[in-house]
């Protein structure tokens, strides 16, 4: 299986997806039931929900050509175990389904998108290790 989508682009999308997945809603005073339960020391460790990260992820996927978006979805389907790597053509066929929700929406609806893409790459002996790093 040869990818039409450059590995560095897939790795950037994985990174953006991880950033979105890492975000948690901030706990404000109105959310606290008991102020003595406050973990102020840990609140600074939480990333506030940031629409910019999701917008960047959406833009990164949307900037891909249609066939690359389809390939990305197929990779995620392999990564989540819907298809075996030997069923790559079947995964591509499902990703191309014209009656399905738009590919971009399907990808953004996957709560573990980064993990699925990472696992999909690993299924084909590919990895983001070292991609985009300066030696």
Image (cartoon, rainbow, N blue to C red):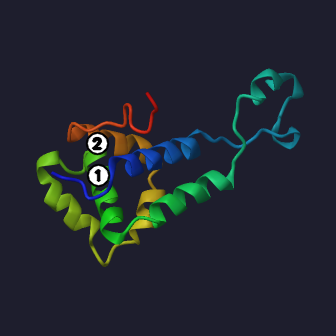
Q: Is residue 29 above or below residue 52?
A: above
Q: Quadrant of residue 119?
A: top left
The percent coordinates of residue 113 (x first, y second) are: 43, 48
Residue 125 visible in image: yes
Task: Say left or right for 124 vs 28.
Answer: left
- Circle 2 sits on which residue? 121
Q: Is residue 26 above or below residue 56?
A: above
Task: Say left or right for 49 vs 54.
Answer: right
Residue lying furthest left: 86
Q: Quadrant of residue 103?
A: bottom left
The foreground one among 108 and 36 is 108
Residue 112 visible in image: no
- Circle 1 sits on which residue? 75
Q: Does the CB distance between marks 2 and 1 fall below 8 Å?
A: yes
Query: Is the C terminus in the top left, top right, bottom left or bottom right quadrant?
Result: top left
The percent coordinates of residue 93 (x first, y second) are: 20, 67
Q: Which SS class for mark 2?
A: helix
Crowding at dot 1, Cα within 10 Å, few <14 / some 14-19 / many 20+, comes out as: many
The percent coordinates of residue 19 (x first, y second) are: 57, 42
Q: Which SS class for mark 1?
A: helix
């Amino acid at each position: 299986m040869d990818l039409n989508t450059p590995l560095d682009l897939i790795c950037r999308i994985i990174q953006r997806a991880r950033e979105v997945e890492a975000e948690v809603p901030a706990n404000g005073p109105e959310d606290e039931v008991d102020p003595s339960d406050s973990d102020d020391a840990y609140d600074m460790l939480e990333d506030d929900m940031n629409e910019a990260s999701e917008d960047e992820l959406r833009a990164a996927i949307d900037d891909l050509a249609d066939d690359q978006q389809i390939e990305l979805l197929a990779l995620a389907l392999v990564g989540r175990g819907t298809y075996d790597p030997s069923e790559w053509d079947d995964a591509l066929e499902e990703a191309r389904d014209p009656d399905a929700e738009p590919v971009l929406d399907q990808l953004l609806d996957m709560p573990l998108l980064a993990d699925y893409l990472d696992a999909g790459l690993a299924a084909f002996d590919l990895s983001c290790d070292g991609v985009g790093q300066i030696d």
